[in-house]
Every structure is written in structure tokens, then in C-alpha cells.
Image (cartoon, rainbow, N blue to C red):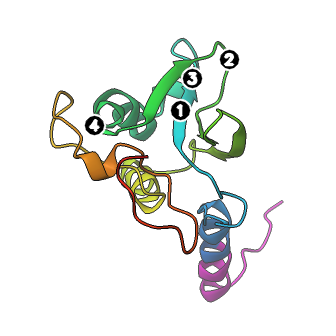
Amino acid sequence: MRLPLPPPPLLLLLAALAAAVTTFRPDWNRLHGLARARVEVSLGSDALVLPQVKAFVTQDIPLYHNLVMKHLPGADPELVLLGHHYEELERIPLSEMTREEINELVQELGFYRKAAPDEAVPPEYLRAPARPAEGAPDRADL
């Protein structure tokens, strides 16, 4: 028995909807106080077999300031956004994202990307991705 397929335009629409659902868009109200993040992965699981996520974890994480990798046995790869006191603000699944999408997201969130892992972070980015409160004076000495 063979099931009929929907017409091609409908298939394209369904694919576009699926892509829109899997792409994370930050809710800046929820992310107030974002200061750092960690990528939780299981080094021994199928999660790190995902080539895009594996490339990001092994090659890109060392370039970002205030972003670390944490090995958790059995964990699906997730970006965990944290506040100033390490409180969890948001969890973003990474399994369905490409390396480029993960990098774009991390940079959109305000994380500083260095050219090399041992490069110094400019003073104005030491507290990145934290954003000053509305109307607060720009003070690098705090």
C-alpha cells in the first residue's frame, strides 16, 4: 500500500515551518542578566557524533570568552545560558543546529570571539555578554 505524497509546494511550506521551529530566537526579557554560558555534552554518547556540534565544541568554544564546555554523561548537546550568579536563564538544544547557526547565535547573544584561544580579551568585553542596565553609565571600572 502506497500513501499519496502532498504536492511539492506544501512540502516546502512544511520544511520551512520545521526550520523556523528549530531556530532559536532569544527572548531578551528572559535573558536579562546574561553573563556567561556553557555547552553541556556527553563525550561518550551519540551527541558528540553529530559533526556540526562536535566541530563547534572542539574548535569554536575555546575562542569564546565566558563560554565553556561541560561534560555530562548522557546529555544531549545544549547551550545553557547563565546569569551573573550562575543561575540558569535558558537551555537551547544544539542537536539540530549547524556549526554556523550555533556560532551566529552565540555572537548574537553577545559573546566575544577571539582570533586565537590564548588571545587577550579587550577590557570592554571582559564582562561580555552582560549588557549594562538601561540608563546606566558606561563604566569599565565596575
Residue annotated with mark 4: 63
Disc 3 or 2, which lies upstream in sequence? 3
First reached walking from the N terminus: tag 1 or tag 4: 1
Q: What range of the chain is rendered magenta? A: 1-14
Q: Which of the two discs, 4 and 2, labels the residue nearer the N terminus? A: 4
Tag on residue 46? 3
Rounded to the nearest angstrom, the CA distance separating label 4 from label 2 is 25 Å
Q: Amino acid at mark 3?
A: Asp
Marks 4 and 3: in contact by CB < 8 Å?
A: no
Q: In the rendered picture of this protein, how many numbered marks are placed on residues?
A: 4
* Camera-nearest label, 1 or 3: 1
For the point 22% across and 43% down, the residue is: 114
Q: Which residue is mark 2?
A: 74
Q: Is residue 105 left or right of residue 61?
A: right
Q: Is residue 114 above or below residue 17?
A: above
Q: Is residue 118 above or below residue 17?
A: above
10 Å crowding of disc 1: few (<14), some (14-19), many (20+): many
**Residue furthest out toward the right:** 1
Q: Mark number for residue 39?
A: 1
- Which residue is depicted at the point 62% across and 71% down? 20
Distance from disc 1 to disc 2, alpha carbons, whole Å, reads: 14 Å
Q: Point out which mark residue 129 bears.
A: none
